[in-house]
């Protein structure tokens, strides 16, 4: 599977309700492989809010300005959610299916490093 | 702060590259055309262009200081590969047109100096350009043509020697409206043309790679900013001087500028043969330097998009795709120049299309400049962001309006 | 808080350099694998070159780019884009550094080598084309 196939794939919950699209993958170093052959695993997905807020870096607080671009993307940034990999039931091929258990997914802005 | 000789050299170099980047064939053509038809009524556009390009040149040089990589390196992930590729193909085509016009500019300067027809000089100019790219270190050549480019200051001297009515110049410069007999669309079209000629992405690009090549570090921030503050306004002053002399000589008799030799004619009228000779040296240096800069900028853009090896630090065989691209572009432009298309027309089209691409060049630089994880304490301040945002917004308006105005006015003919 | 990072900003589209700091290409795509034990996908390789980029972009321009890139490459590796295994990727800050030199990656930067060998090497002043 290519990472870019996952990007922009629609995400639905266990009842098929749409949650937005995948706009970024959150990756982490694999803890068991801190040797010469290290690697990454997908820790979760950044979902919803539209592509721009993610591509421009506002979704993960890389930038605070300029004011106008921040304003344009502010609402999208609040909409963006984080889906931990453990909650993903199916990664494809058409849609990503996640288990929400009826609860709200955490906002992306709350789980990224400031 | 102690002033060391090396710092002084750094000042002059950076300043020269700023002037050299600002004045190229686009300016030589557009300023003379505008001066002859609108006097100084579009000088305010040059003022805006100077401020805008200063802001983005400073921003991209600051990014280069911090990351030691040219600003566009970080652009692809922000624009996405599709838009970035569109911008790349667009700038490749614009550059082919521009290099064609620059080569014609070199050849016309040689024709005026020697009497031999310019079409014979075009292939010779192209060969010399290729040898310089192939063999000479860029810093040395940049120094030479930057220094020779100072000869353009003769246009400023010529303004005084033409003994102008200063109050009339001032009145013209402070009027924002077309002259009588000219239409608003034509006025706006030439405003777009000036923006395209004076806010070229390669200036920003070049100033920032100069920062990488001079091995500037974050501690050299002040030096870099002094260069921006001196260099670009000087370039703007030259541009306004070209507009002014064209105004003084061509406006009243109603002569239209249709040939590049007309750009230097007012200097000859004001200062005689010596003045003309100096102006020709200036034109030669400006167009020759700009040919190198535009070719390199496009080669770098392409190399960075695909992550290829590039640049002057590697011998040509180590960066073969880069060298091949630059050579192919030069060949294409030479072929275009030999078709005897009017270089003035080609220049106008090139700078108008260049203005269409401006937002694609500015947006990623503005985003990277604000990225705190990349830039740390060197991230954009309020001044950079305010001027940068306003410039970006205006560039979007210019980008959208450029082609409709081109069609509406038949490239400024009506 | 969480030490996970954005794929967009740490891996995808980043500059790749080899162990000797020579530019190799860009990370044009990332190959993921779903482990059989049901764990999250892991990065098995980064893809580089115009073929991977063309396939990612899609559309007529992307298809053309991928087809040309695939055609330019020779031998049995034609069908798949150039992949660099995750085991060859070292530390990354602003760029992605490999732990091996370019010479150890025979399928990477094929056009560069071809042009060096056939076109540029014969010209005077080209320097030494061989690595």
Image: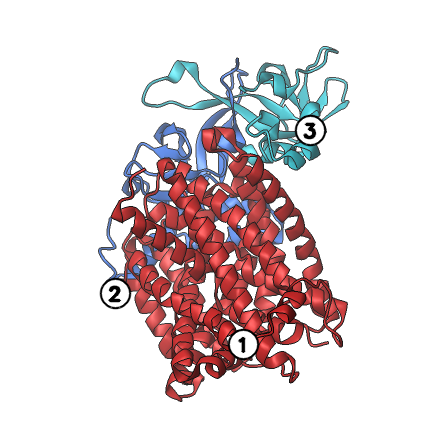
Chain colours: A cyan, B red, C blue
Q: Residue at x 34, y 68 (%)?
A: B130
Picture layout, residue B230 above or below residue B41: above
Q: From the image, tell me which residue sits under label 3.
A: A74
Q: Around disc 3, counting alpha carbons within 10 Å, would you say few (fewer than 14), some (14 to 19), or many (20 or more)? A: some
Q: Chain of mark 3?
A: A
Q: SS at mark 3?
A: helix
The x, y position of residue B29, in whole percent, is 55, 72
| 1 or 2: mark nearer the eye | 1
Whether labels 2 and 3 belong to a single chain: the reply is: no
B293 relative position to A53: left or right: left
Give the spatial CA distance, label 1 vs label 2.
59 Å
Q: How many marks?
A: 3
Q: Around disc 2, counting alpha carbons within 10 Å, would you say few (fewer than 14), some (14 to 19), or many (20 or more)? A: few
Q: From the image, tell me which residue sits under label 1.
A: B163
Q: Residue at x 59, y 14 (%)?
A: A86
Image-quadrant location for residue B133: bottom left
The x, y position of residue B313, in whole percent, is 29, 51
B348 relative position to B296: left or right: right
In the image, B236 versus B97, the foreground residue is B236
Q: Is residue C71 visible?
A: no
The image quadrant where one finds the N terminus of chain B is top left
The x, y position of residue B30, in whole percent, is 58, 70
Residue C122, label in figure: 2
Picture layout, residue A95 above or below residue B83: above
Q: SS at mark 2?
A: loop
In the image, B300 versus B269, the foreground residue is B269
Picture layout, residue A71 above or below residue B177: above
Whether labels 1 and 3 belong to a single chain: the reply is: no
């Amino acid at each position: 599977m290519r990472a870019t196939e996952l990007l922009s794939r629609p995400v639905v919950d266990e009842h098929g309700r749409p949650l937005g699209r995948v706009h970024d993958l959150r990756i982490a170093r694999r803890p068991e492989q801190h040797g010469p052959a290290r690697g990454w695993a997908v820790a979760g997905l950044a979902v919803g809010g539209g592509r721009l807020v993610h591509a421009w870096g506002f979704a993960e607080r890389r930038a605070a300005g300029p004011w106008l671009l921040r304003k344009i993307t502010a609402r999208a940034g609040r909409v963006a959610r984080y889906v931990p990999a453990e909650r993903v039931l199916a990664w494809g091929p058409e849609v990503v299916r996640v288990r929400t258990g009826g609860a709200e997914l955490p906002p992306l802005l709350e789980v990224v490093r400031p | 702060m102690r002033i060391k000789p090396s710092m002084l050299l750094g000042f002059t170099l950076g300043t020269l590259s700023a002037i050299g980047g600002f004045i190229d064939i686009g300016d030589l053509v557009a300023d003379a055309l505008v001066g002859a038809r609108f006097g100084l009524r579009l000088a305010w556009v040059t003022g805006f262009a100077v401020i805008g390009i200063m802001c983005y040149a400073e921003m991209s040089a600051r990014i280069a200081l911090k990351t030691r990589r040219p600003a566009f390196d970080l652009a692809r992930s922000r624009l996405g590969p599709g838009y970035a590729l569109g911008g790349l193909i667009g700038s490749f085509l614009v550059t082919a047109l521009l290099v064609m016009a620059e080569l014609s500019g070199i050849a016309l300067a040689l024709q005026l100096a020697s009497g031999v027809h310019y079409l014979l000089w075009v292939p010779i100019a192209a060969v010399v350009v290729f040898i310089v790219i192939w063999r000479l270190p860029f810093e040395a050549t940049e120094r030479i043509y930057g220094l020779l480019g100072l000869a353009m200051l003769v246009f400023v001297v010529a303004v005084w020697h033409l003994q102008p009515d200063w109050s009339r110049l001032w009145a013209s410069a402070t009027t924002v409206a077309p002259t009588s007999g000219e239409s608003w669309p034509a006025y706006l079209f030439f405003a777009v043309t000036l923006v395209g000629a004076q806010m070229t992405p390669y200036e920003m690009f070049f100033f920032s790679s100069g920062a990488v090549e001079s091995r500037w570090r974050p501690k050299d921030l002040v030096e870099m900013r002094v260069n921006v503050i001196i260099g670009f306004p000087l370039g703007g002053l030259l541009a306004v001087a070209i507009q002014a002399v064209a105004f003084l000589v061509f406006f009243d008799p109603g002569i239209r500028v249709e040939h590049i030799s007309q750009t230097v004619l007012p200097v000859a009228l004001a200062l005689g043969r010596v003045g003309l000779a100096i102006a020709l040296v200036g034109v030669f240096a400006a167009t020759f330097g700009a040919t190198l800069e535009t070719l390199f900028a496009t080669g770098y853009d392409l190399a960075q998009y695909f992550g290829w090896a590039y640049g002057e630090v590697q011998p040509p065989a180590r960066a073969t795709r880069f060298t091949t691209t630059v050579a192919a572009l030069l060949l294409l432009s030479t072929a275009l120049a030999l078709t005897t298309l009017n270089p003035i027309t080609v220049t106008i089209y090139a700078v108008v299309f260049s203005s269409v691409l401006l937002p694609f060049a500015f947006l990623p630089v503005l985003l990277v400049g604000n990225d705190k994880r990349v830039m740390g304490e060197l991230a954009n301040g309020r001044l950079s962001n305010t001027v940068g945002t306003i410039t970006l917004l205006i560039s979007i308006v210019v980008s959208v309006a450029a082609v409709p105005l081109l069609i509406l006015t038949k490239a400024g003919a009506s | 808080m969480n030490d996970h990072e954005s794929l967009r900003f740490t891996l995808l589209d980043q500059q790749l350099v080899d162990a000797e700091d020579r530019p190799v290409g860009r990370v044009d795509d990332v190959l993921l694998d779903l482990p059989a034990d049901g764990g999250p996908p892991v990065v098995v390789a980064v893809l580089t070159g115009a073929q991977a980029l063309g396939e990612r972009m899609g559309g007529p321009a992307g298809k053309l780019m991928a087809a040309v890139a695939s055609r330019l490459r020779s031998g049995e590796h034609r069908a798949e884009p150039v992949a660099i295994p995750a085991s060859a990727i070292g530390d990354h800050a602003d760029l992605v550094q490999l732990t091996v030199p370019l010479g150890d990656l025979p399928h990477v930067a094929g056009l560069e080598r071809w042009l060096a060998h056939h076109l540029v090497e014969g010209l005077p002043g080209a320097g030494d084309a061989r690595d």
